[in-house]
Each structure stands twice: as structure tokens, then as C-alpha cells.
Image (tube, rainbow, N blue to C red):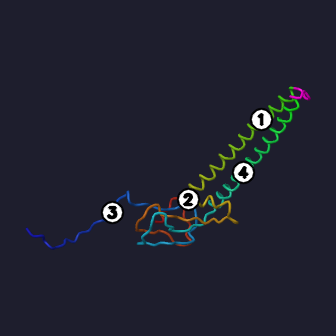
């Protein structure tokens, strides 16, 4: 038996295995301001594909920074109130032990200390929940943890975010042009 060297012309369709393909688009509305790759480009996982401008990101970043400031303020205020209540309690306890003040004053100081602790814990927990929610919103919008952590040190907010490749591979289609406004239903790559 000898192999036959021939070919048969036929029409067909080449399919990419679905578990090795990704449709990439923004999770919110934005305007494309820069493109880094085109059809046929080989990309690595995490590689920047495009930059988009978005008012949604701008607003979410501002909400996160406000939540961060509120959390820090709640922590500091709580610590100051507990410190004052603790000092008042300690002073009242010393006066009570020396029989200079009545027991009801000691009980009132102890009550005020307990209230300050409970109020502070509640305030900090509420602020932390708001901060966690604001951070989660930014993650959903496509920012990375490192981008979010860097927000507190930025001098101004920029509404530009990057669209990155979730997998390594070859760009087989690009439906993106600079200046186009795109939404969450758009597959750009």
C-alpha cells in the first residue's frame, strides 16, 4: 500500500473550540480612546487590548474614595470616643475607690464606655461594608486590585480604564474603532 498524494477541494468552516475562545468587551458604557492590538495579533493573558473612557468608572472611583475616607474617619472617631470614655471611667473608678464619688457616677461612666465601644464598632462596621461594596463595584467594572489600591495616591481621577485579555491567544476578530462608544453588550475582540 502506498499513500495517495492528492487533495480534494471542499468548502467548510473552521471552528475554534469554545473552551479556548473568549469574547471580550466592557462591562459598562465607554468610548474607545486607544487600541493596542488588531486582528491576527498574538496576545498574552492580561495583555492590554484597548483603553476606554468612562463616566461610570469616574463615578465609581469617586464613590470608592469617599467610602475610604468615611471608613478612616469612622475608625479615628471611634478610637477617640472610646479613649475619652475609657479615661473618664478610669478617673471615676479611682475617685469611687477613694470614696470621693458615688457608685452611680461609676456606673454611668461604665455605661458611657460600653456605649462608646458599641457605637464605634457599629460605625466602623457600616463604613467598612460601604467601602467593601464600592471596591467590589470597581472590580466588577474591570479595575484590578492594584489599580484600586493606587487610587488613594492619585492626584486626579481619570475616567480611562484598560480592557485586558483574559486568555492567551490570537485575536481572530476586532470590532473596535477609536472614538466609538460601546456598551456592555458589545464584543470588541
> What is the C-alpha distance between the residues marked 3 and 2?
29 Å
What is the secondary structure assignment of the residue under circle 2?
A: loop
Q: Earlier along the polypeptide chain: callout 1 or callout 2? A: 1
Which one is in front, 118 or 164?
118
User: Is residue 150 covered in magenta?
Assistant: no
Name the residue beneath numbered marker 4.
Answer: 72
Residue 115 marker: 1
* Front position among marks 4 and 2: 4
* Front position among marks 3 and 2: 2
* Front position among marks 3 and 1: 1
Residue 15 marker: 3
What is the secondary structure assignment of the residue under circle 1?
A: helix
Residue drawn 54% across and 61% down?
Answer: 183
What is the secondary structure assignment of the residue under circle 4?
A: helix
Q: Judge the density around disc 4: few (<14), some (14-19), many (≥20) Cα neighbours within 10 Å.
A: some
Name the residue beneath numbered marker 2.
Answer: 142
Which one is in front, 181 or 94?
94
From which residue to which does the magenta span run? 97-102
Q: Earlier along the polypeptide chain: callout 4 or callout 2? A: 4
Which one is in front, 162 or 185?
162
> What is the C-alpha distance between the residues marked 4 and 2?
25 Å
Residue drawn 79% across and 35% down?
Answer: 113
* Front position among marks 1 and 2: 1
Amino acid at each position: 500500500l502506498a499513500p495517495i498524494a492528492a487533495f480534494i477541494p471542499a468548502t467548510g468552516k473552521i471552528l475554534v473550540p469554545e473552551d479556548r475562545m473568549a469574547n471580550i468587551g466592557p462591562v459598562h458604557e465607554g468610548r474607545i480612546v486607544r487600541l493596542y492590538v488588531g486582528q491576527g495579533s498574538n496576545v498574552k493573558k492580561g495583555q492590554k487590548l484597548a483603553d476606554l473612557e468612562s463616566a461610570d468608572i469616574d463615578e465609581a472611583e469617586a464613590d470608592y474614595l469617599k467610602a475610604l475616607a468615611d471608613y478612616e474617619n469612622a475608625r479615628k472617631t471611634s478610637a477617640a470616643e472610646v479613649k475619652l470614655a475609657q479615661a473618664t471611667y478610669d478617673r471615676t473608678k479611682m475617685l469611687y475607690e477613694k470614696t470621693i464619688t458615688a457608685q452611680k457616677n461609676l456606673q454611668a461612666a461604665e455605661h458611657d464606655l460600653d456605649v462608646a465601644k458599641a457605637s464605634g464598632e457599629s460605625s466602623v462596621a457600616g463604613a467598612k461594608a460601604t467601602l467593601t461594596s464600592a471596591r467590589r463595584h470597581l472590580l466588577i467594572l474591570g479595575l484590578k486590585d492594584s489599580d484600586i489600591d493606587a487610587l488613594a495616591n492619585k492626584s486626579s481621577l481619570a475616567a480611562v480604564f484598560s480592557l485586558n485579555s483574559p486568555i492567551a491567544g490570537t485575536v481572530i476578530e476586532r470590532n473596535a474603532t477609536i472614538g466609538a462608544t460601546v456598551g456592555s453588550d458589545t464584543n470588541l475582540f
